[in-house]
Structure formats: structure tokens, C-alpha cells
Image (tube, grey):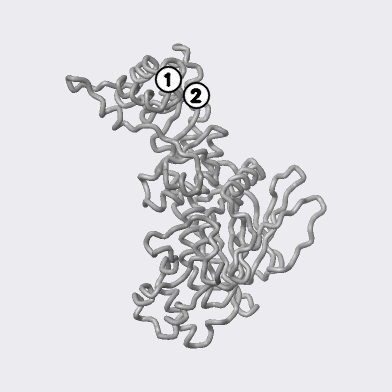
Amino acid sequence: MTEQTPQRVSDYRSSTCNESTAFLTDMYELTMLDAALQDGTAFRQCAFEVFTRRLPAERRYGVVAGTARVIDAITSFRFTEEQIASAPFLSDAAKQYLRDYTFTGDIDGYREGDLYFPYSPILTVRGTFAECVILETVILSIFNSDSAVASAASRMVSAADGKPIIEMGSRRTHELAAVSAARATYIAGFDATSNMEASHRYGIPASGTAAHAWTLLHVDENGQPDEKAAFKAQIDAAGVDTTLLVDTFDITKGVENALEVAGTDLGAVRIDSGDLGIVSRRVRKQLDEAGAFNTRIIVSSDLDEFTIAGLRSDPVDGFGVGTSVVTGSGAPTAGLVYKLVEVEGHAVAKRSSGKRTYGGAKTALRAYRASGVAVGEVILPLGSDVERKPNLDYQELTVPMIRGGKVVDADFDLESARSLHAQARTTLPWEGLALSRGEAAIPTKFVGFPEPAE
């Protein structure tokens, strides 16, 4: 591997930049870089930190998602001549800096799939001001989107209480965002996606059968709907274990037609309309009376975590979720920020009402009772430690990801992130899993920092 060849840790691709991620940025990052080169501050050693001051919508926890994509984007951060030419406002010195740019600093952060809370140092980027400041936008755009989706998806998984969920929101978001959203939902515990690019790129199980258009396509010689013909053709193509969409016309008749064509070994029926609780109970009764005890009921139709929780006690075997999850279920951004916290070893922080910031590079620990339940998050100055209580267990949360510009042997595997999140969610106190608004599931405590000014 040559110095110019980026080390890829995922399969991130930017269709707009010929695989360069450098122009996924804001103009002010380039103007700051230019000014810093001119006044001599560009090469001051700095630390930037990704964190949130509050969880959106008073949720109890957030989910870290997008880490592998962030690391991949940083290793792909190279400026092309075409990009540089499109920024005529830059000085010659700045243009040359961009031609030679490669990140040479260090990055530490929370593992993908882990939980985070207010002020958790999700990612710490250390290096010169010039090389760190221009990474802000690409880092935040990935983390804010992916973490928002994963956080919403995790709440849905908790609400489903073990019943499978399929992500099917591709048609409700940007075509590339749909791929990253599917990845984020899988980390959070969704079982499959309808998005073929996400399945191809990340190995996520794909799921999907037919839409209403398939049923409407089938008409008899008189132009009248022929639902049974549609069902038979689908079964002939996909087998009896397929899922038949039974609500195109009349649900009761749709189930009757499905059983007439498929028999009692039909895999599942899907319901995409109506009062899903009432309808699912009626359909279950109809299926059982026909002897189709093993035919599952899958429901969709603008579901979110609250409707899923409401259907949990009904005879629903699985859920299909679209718009809500890919838009963060009311919180389309995680509210993460990227702030300069240290310059040449000195802690720095802005002073602004309502935007409290703790200066200095940080590390973090999470404390657990012997039962495995998390009781708090402790944030420390980087390189320090805390007096540990003997009745608690502590886990280090920040791990090395890049050293000297090179990706280290951190675990960026998607299945590892998924497993980590499943385990992390079990450590939350019961109130932390509640869908109601409230305080963060566990408190965050700063040790070794002066109280910041506001």
C-alpha cells in the first residue's frame, strides 16, 4: 500500500466527488484554513470533539452510528484539481496545501453501536488546526444522520420486544441516505432491509415481496380485479412461504383468497392499512379458524416506536417501518457538534448562554453495578484516571481509531457494531428504555474539569 492509497474500512462511496470526500464540506472551513495559513496558526496542535449538549426530544439515550463511514471518509479526504479550481477565493498557498492534504493526526472515539449521552466525547480528532478543521462537515453530516436513524431504530426495536422489524424507507429519503439509513437501522437491531444497495454493500439481509401494484396488475378478461391470480402468480414464482399483501381491496376477502390459493402453509400476510390492532386480531382469528396457525401477520403503514408499542400485545408477528425510521422519528438530526476544545495543550471553550462546553481533550468511562446495569458516565481529561469505586465495574468507552493518519486495528465490522448495541441496550435501567420523555438514562459526570462558563 502506498502513502497515497487510502485505507478503506467500509464501502463508503461518494457518487458526487469521484470517491473524494473532500468537498463534502462548508466554505467557511476552507476560508478558515486559508486565513490560518496566512497568520501562522494553521499548524498549532489542536483537539476537536464530537458531542451533543442534549438528546433530541428528551430521549433517554442515543446510539453511535456511522463511525466506520466517518473513518473511511477521512481516509478518502483528498482534493482533486477540479475541486481546487472551483474555489477561486483561495490563496495560492491554500490551494497548494489542499493538493498535498492528507490527515496525519490521531482519532479516538466510541465504538459504533455503543450508547451515548449528553457531553459524551463520541469522537476526538487531534492534529494541526488546518488538517482537523476542514473535516468538520463530513464528520458531522455522517454522524448526525446515521446516529439519528440508529437512535430512532433502537427505540423501535425495544418497542417491538423481540418481534422482527424490516426497514423499508428507501422511497422516503435521498437515494444515498437510504443506504446509510438501512445500515444504521441494522446496527440498532432491525432484521432486514428492502434496499438492495444496502444489502449488496453491507451484507444486510434483504426482504420484500410485492406491492399493491402487483395485485392491481392482475385483471380478468372483463377488466375486473383478479386478486387470486395475483396471489397464485406470486406463489408460483416465490413459493408458498412468501408474504401476500391482502389489503388491496377487502382484507377479509384478501385473506380468504390467499388461503384458497396458498393453503394453510402460507408464510405470511401483510396488512398496510386500517386500524392495525383491530384488523390483526380479526385476521388472526380468520387464519386460525382456517387452520393456518403458522401463517404470520406482518403490518406496515407509517409505523413509529409508539404505534409499534401499541401493537405489541396484538397478534402481530413483525413490522415494516419506512418514513419514520429514515427521518429519525421526529428527530432527523442527532444534534451533534464538532468543537475545538484544545490548542497546544491548553483547554479552550466558547462562552454562550445555553451552549455549555467543557474544554480539553477527553476520555470516558461507564460505570456498572455488579448486575450489569449502567449507573453513570464519567468524563475525564485525556490520559487521566479516576478513583474507581470498589462496588462498581468500569468500562473504557473511547478506543484508538487512527494514529498518525493510519487506521489502527479497531473493530469496524458491522456485525460487531450490531452485537455491541444489542448488549449495550440491556445495560440501561428500565426507565432508560421508556418511550416517554425524561432525563438521560444515566447521568454524565465530569471529573478533573473546571466548571465551564456560559
Q: Which quadrant of the rendered structure holds the C terminus?
A: bottom right
In the displayed structure image, the side of residue 28 where residue 418 appears, left or right: right
Residue occupying image coordinates x 59% and y 74%: 127
C-alpha gap between disc 1 and disc 2: 9 Å
The residue singled out by tag 1 in the image is: 283
Left or right of 254 on screen, residue 216 = left
Q: Secondary structure at mark 2?
A: loop
How many C-alpha atoms fall within 10 Å of the one at disc 2: few (<14), some, or many (≥20)? Answer: some
Residue drawn at (36%, 28%) of the image: 274
Q: Are marks 1 and 2 in contact (CB under 8 Å)?
A: yes
Identity of the residue drawn at 29% across and 32% down? 213
The numbered dot on residue 404 is: none
Q: Name the residue type under label 2.
A: Pro
The earlier-in-sequence mark between 1 and 2 is: 1
Residue extending furthest toward the front: 1
Which disc, if any, is residue 315? 2
Q: Quadrant of residue 279?
A: top left
Q: Amino acid at mark 1?
A: Val
* 451 is higher (above) or lower (below) than 272: below
Q: Position of residue 108 (x, y in %)?
A: 62, 64
Vertical position of residue 283 compared to residue 154: above or below: above
- The residue at the far right in this view is 390
